[in-house]
Amino acid sequence: MSSLSVIVPCYNEEVALPIFFERIEKIRLEFPLEFEYIFVNDGSTDGTLDTLRSLCDENTFVHYLSFSRNFGKEAAILAGLQTASGDYVTLMDADLQDPPELLLEMYEKIQEKDIDCVAAQRVSRSGEALLISVGSRLFYKLINKMSKTEIIDGVRDFRLMTRQVVDAILQLSEYNRFSKGLFSWVGFNTQYISYENQQRVAGKTKWNFWEKVAYAFDGFVNFSEAPLEIATYTGLTTVFLTIIGIIALIIRQLFFHHSVSGWTSMIVVLLFCFGFTLLMLGIIGKYISNIFLESKKRPVYIVKEQK
């Protein structure tokens, strides 16, 4: 009988886990595949690990990995994919923002000819903060203009994949990971199932505004060279305009005998140039930082406990 590996990254989900497990167990009983659960405890500081130990002791098909510290969701996803042994693999959040009921529809869809992956796509952002919602939409518009890898707005990590897709993703061994881009980059035929945005059942979100901004910036750096090209072309443009300005000032002095008045304009120009230079150095520095981290060859995560 074919099997399904359910990968669930967990970070301080002590309250949500029992609710999640009870709900997805109802789906398991209706599913035509054997289940294996792989919970990945990403350095939680609450009772998440104790809850996972209890679930594992009570159910032979439940397994868990526990990191030595918090390595981030990307590391947890990779650990789950590397551990999963099922013919099909799915990624889900423990907070039930990914409705388990969609798994049945996903499985029916993936049985169709030439379908390799079925992903869930939110059709609304109800309940989400306005600033985060607007920022997310802007991110998807920008990255799809700047990157050759299409990343579709509203598509979450929640998806059902064949073993072939998972094996392809595992071939991508980079340290700086951006799963939304990796899922698209490997290709394969992906279908999408729409659903309304779901609210977290318990606990608090672990992603604040600035963490999402940092994650979005990682997406730009990992899947687009456009920021470097922008730095290059805007730098050249600034130099060109500066040369034009110098020539204009020389002509003005030689033929019209007007000296440069005041220092305000000079200070404004200097501040702009220095600020712009620092911004471009920051963009270039981010790329260099990623290269530096890749060159260290450090493990993406460290497992402290596994069962």
Image: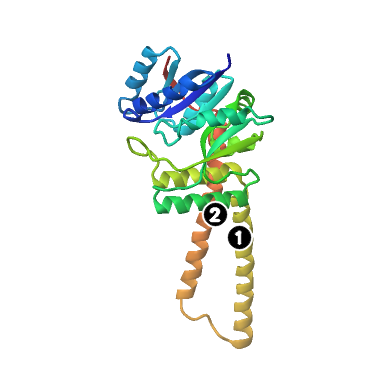
Front residue of this view, candidates 189 and 290 = 189
* Three-letter amino acid code at the position of disc 2: Met
Residue at screen point 47% across, 28% down: 76
First reached walking from the N terminus: tag 2 or tag 1: 1
Front residue of this view, candidates 155 and 67 = 155
* Residue wearing tag 1: 234
Front residue of this view, candidates 150 and 230 = 150
- Badge 1 marks a residue whose secondary structure is helix
Residue 301: image x %, image y %? 47, 26
- Badge 2 marks a residue whose secondary structure is helix
Q: Residue furthest right?
A: 114
Whether residue 299 is visible to the viewer of this picture, yes or no, is: no
Residue at screen point 57% across, 52% down: 142
Question: Label 1: few (<14), some or many (≥20) within 10 Å?
Answer: some
* Residue wearing tag 2: 280
Up-down relation of residue 153 to residue 46 (above or below): below
Q: Quadrant of the C terminus?
A: top left
